[in-house]
Image: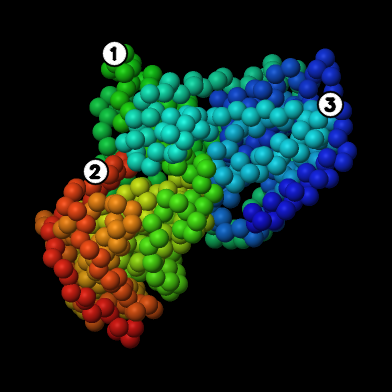
Amino acid sequence: YRKTVRAAMATAVATTAAAAPTPASSTDGASSVHWFRKGLRLHDNPALLAAVRGARCVRCVYILDPWFAASSSVGINRWRFLLQSLEDLDTSLRKLNSRLFVVRGQPADVFPRLFKEWGVTRLTFEYDSEPFGKERDAAIMKMAKEAGVEVVTENSHTLYDLDRIIELNGQKPPLTYKRFQAIISRMELPKKPVGSVTSQQMESCRAEIQENHDETYGVPSLEELGFPTEGLGPAVWQGGETEALARLDKHLERKAWVANYERPRMNANSLLASPTGLSPYLRFGCLSCRLFYYRLWDLYKKVKRNSTPPLSLFGQLLWREFFYTAATNNPRFDRMEGNPICIQIPWDRNPEALAKWAEGKTGFPWIDAIMTQLRQEGWIHHLARHAVACFLTRGDLWVSWESGVRVFDELLLDADFSVNSGSWMWLSCSAFFQQFFHCYCPVGFGRRTDPSGDYIRRYLPKLKGFPSRYIYEPWNAPESIQKAAKCIIGVDYPRPIVNHAETSRLNIERMKQIYQQLSRYRGLCLLASVPSCVEDLNHPVAEPSSSQAGSMSSTGPRPLPSGPASPKRKLEAAEEPPGEELSKRARVTELPTPELPSKDA
């Protein structure tokens, strides 16, 4: 798709250059188009205010490519959230005597026509820091310049100027969170949010709205975009700025949490979608990150009597900035090949295991319930994301993080290029994070979080008849209990795809050997004795035996030739994303290669 867009951009730029109209004089007032992309809101939208300023006419445009909708791998929940956000934006603009113009096509094809048809003299939009967005915008800006159209861009999707962060770090992005924090602590505070556009401002530059506006420029339905909606449940997350601001108010009502801020602790209720959750709204720009930042700031100072808030209060926002900074000049950030910060780990190609993971059919109820919730609702708790990411990559299946990125891109409402890719590299120990001996147990982690197993019963109703003792490891339930639960393991619910205890220990050894080999070339310093993940001693876990484990299409993990031991110097402590919960550590000796379940087991 990106190749198609780039080709269209090149053609459109050449065509536009041949017939550039003369722009209207400044005394006539500008004919402005504001191009909505991610910033789907009226509050804190400086680019929209720039469109209105001194204009005689303003049209608000969103460009939607129907071909992309029909052919992309983005799932129905994300499209529904986007369309709801556009509907909400159009409703808000109606209150200002304006409308949203949803134009079908690709930007490189659409803008030459709009420039001519509407006599456009000014184009405004929010700055996009991501590599593909910068490439797209550079082509549109060149096209606009050749057409005599002024272009105004404003940064409001991130808190900081990412280029300035890179400049202060010696012209390269900081690749540890600690270094990132050190850089921003030397910078000025983020700019404060600007006010919303007013009805008086829009009244002075109102564009003519045709009677057939809805037919020509209305927000399409899912059905019009070719999505089957039969059996589609109600939206758990309602898209739009109106919902985002209501959620922000609820979020900030928790004054005690703000006053005594600590990392969020995970429990059974945390696993379900919260009415105060904000991540999809920040991703689509329905909520300004700057508004969120300063509302938190002001409330903290009020509760704490004007003391300065700690950086930890803004942890989730700052991790977002960290990954945006790392990605902004790296167009290969979402893949291994050509990615300068990614360790080239020799992952297995195992489409069967990948499909079972993505479809929630691994035989581990904790993993399968998480993936089922993701597919149904478009969201999972960030620690649940950690669990399934570790399981797919270095923990159990040894499948590349690139495959996980693609699945999350399809299903996750808040997935974007920078944060999604950065998180997957982190959790697979491919970049940013080197403590590969930390591992999530697909049984013990869930059991500690929700001992009763109600989360499993909610998303895997096949298992609802199992008692809590067995619901996280139903393969260990006696046959009588399986029959009483009306769920026979291996018939009604799959056997575990791997033996976690054996596979995870072997994978840790693989990672250890990879890092030792890298240390010869990169000078990485690794621990001489690498701890293994073990289960919480308070919650012993009975793993499936080889005869109980399900099949694997690959031959299993293959140890790499061992390199020389690295110097006995500790790694610099890697910072962990907010809420990171890791298994206890233990010393290990060289592990023998376990006999993995055979394909016919």
Q: Residue furthest bottom?
A: 600
Q: Closer to us: mark 1 or mark 3?
A: 3
> Can you give x and y, in whole percent of width and height, for residue 555 in the image?
34, 79
**Contact (CB < 8 A) between labels 1 and 2?**
no
- Residue 458 appears in which quarter of the rendering? bottom left
Distance CA(mark 1)–CA(mark 3): 54 Å
Is residue 292 rendered to the left or right of residue 500?
right
Could you tell me which residue is drawn at 54 percent across and 60 percent down? 231
User: Is 194 situated above or below 215?
Assistant: above
Question: Looking at the figure, which quarter contains the N terminus?
Answer: bottom right
Q: Which residue is mark 1?
A: 305
Q: Secondary structure at mark 1?
A: loop
The amino acid type of the residue labelled 2 equals Ala
Q: Which residue is mark 2?
A: 573
Could you tell me which residue is drawn at 50 percent across and 56 percent down? 338
Q: Which residue is mark 3?
A: 23
Question: Looking at the figure, which quarter contains the C terminus?
Answer: bottom left
Q: Closer to us: mark 1 or mark 2?
A: 2
Q: For this rendering, which residue is in front, 388 or 482?
A: 388
> Can you give x and y, in whole percent of width and height, for residue 554 in the image?
37, 77
Circle 2 packing at 10 Å, graded few (<14), some (14-19), many (20+), is: few
Q: What is the basis of the colouring in this image?
A: rainbow
Is residue 86 rendered to the left or right of residue 296?
right
The amino acid type of the residue labelled 3 equals Pro
> Can you give x and y, in whole percent of width and height, for residue 431 in the image?
37, 51
